Amino acid sequence: MDQPYIRIRGLTHHFGENEVLRELDLDIFRGETMAILGGSGGGKSVLLKQLAGLLRPTQGSIQVDGQEIANLDERALGPVRRKMGILFQGGALFDSLTVAENVAFPLRESGDAKEPEIDSRVIEALQMVRLSGQEDKLPSELSGGMRKRVALARAVVGRPTCVLYDEPQAGLDPINSDAIDHLIKDLQRTLGITSVVVTHEIRSVFHIADRVAFLANGKIEWLGTPQALADTDNHDLRRFVAGDSGEAWK
C-alpha cells in the first residue's frame, strides 16, 4: 500500500455561499476499506460524488489510479467510472425491471459486452451477493436487505477496482446490516476491491474498516485504524462514536 489508489489534495466544494468541503486531503490505498464518518450534512455524500465524477469540485485535485479527474469532461470520465462501482443509499433500483435487468443495466448502457457475456456476468454478480435464483423477481418482491444486495451486485457487475458505498446499512435491521458488512469484506478479500464506505454505523466500522476518516468542518479532522478510534482521546470523536449529544434527558 505504498501508492494511494485515490489521492485527494485541497478539495473544496461550494454550494452557493455554503462551503461543504474545505481544502480536504486524503489518501485511500489500493485494496483497503476506508470508512468515512461524520455528522449529517457534513459533506460525506458530496465527497463520494466527487470521487465518482458526479460533481466537479470548486477547486482541488482528485487522482484515481494516478489519473487526475477533477476537471475531466463527461466523455473522458467514462473510463474512470468503469473502474468504480457505486452503491447508492437507497439502492436506486428500477422498479419496473427484474433483478437480472437491474444488475445488467450498467453493462447494457456502456455497450462494452454482448448479451451472452452480460448474462454470465449477471449470474456471477448475483452469486457473489448470495442471490442466485432471484433473477426474475421485481424489486417489490424483495426484502430491504435483498434489494441492497441487488444494488451491490449491480455495483460490482462491471468488475470495478473500487466500490463507493453511501450508507450501505441504512434502513436495514442488524442481521441484514451484518450480511452487508460480510459482503463488503468478502469482495475485498476475494477481488482486492478498494472500498470507500460512508456510514453512521459504528459497529460496522469496527467490522469492515482498515482505516477510518472523521469528516468535520469540511476537512478530515481525524484519521486512523479502528483500534485507534476505540482508544482515541479526541473529545468530539468520542462523543460521536458513543452517540452522545451532550444533552441530558429531562
Image: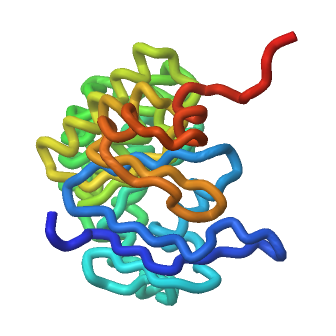
Q: Is residue 111 above or below residue 74?
A: above
| Vertical side of 129 occupied by 72: above or below | below
Asked whether residue 91 is in view, the answer is no
- Residue 247, position as x, y percentages in the image: 78, 24
Q: Seen from this angle, which residue lies furthest top? A: 250
Q: Is residue 137 left or right of residue 189?
A: right
Q: Is residue 94 left or right of residue 115?
A: right
Residue 102 image point, x, y percent = 44, 44
Residue 214 relative to residue 196: left or right: right
Q: Residue at x 40, y 58 (%)?
A: 106
Q: Quadrant of the N terminus?
A: bottom left
Residue at point 52%, 71% (across, down): 24
233, 124: nearer the viewer: 233
Which residue in the rendered view is the most extreme toward the front? 233
Quadrant location of residue 26?
Answer: bottom left
Residue drawn at 42 percent across, 83 percent down? 69
Inspect this view and state whether residue 175 appears.
Answer: yes
Place of residue 219 in the rendered image (x, y in percent of width and height, measured from the top left): 56, 64
Taking depth in this image into account, of 81 and 121 the one nearest to the observer is: 81
Tell me what residue is drawn at x 21 percent, y 62 percent.
30
Between 178 and 202, the one lying in front of the other is 202
The spot of residue 120 in percent (x, y) is 18, 46
Query: Number of numbered discs present?
Result: 0
Quadrant where the C terminus is found in the figure: top right
Q: Quadrant of residue 109?
A: bottom left
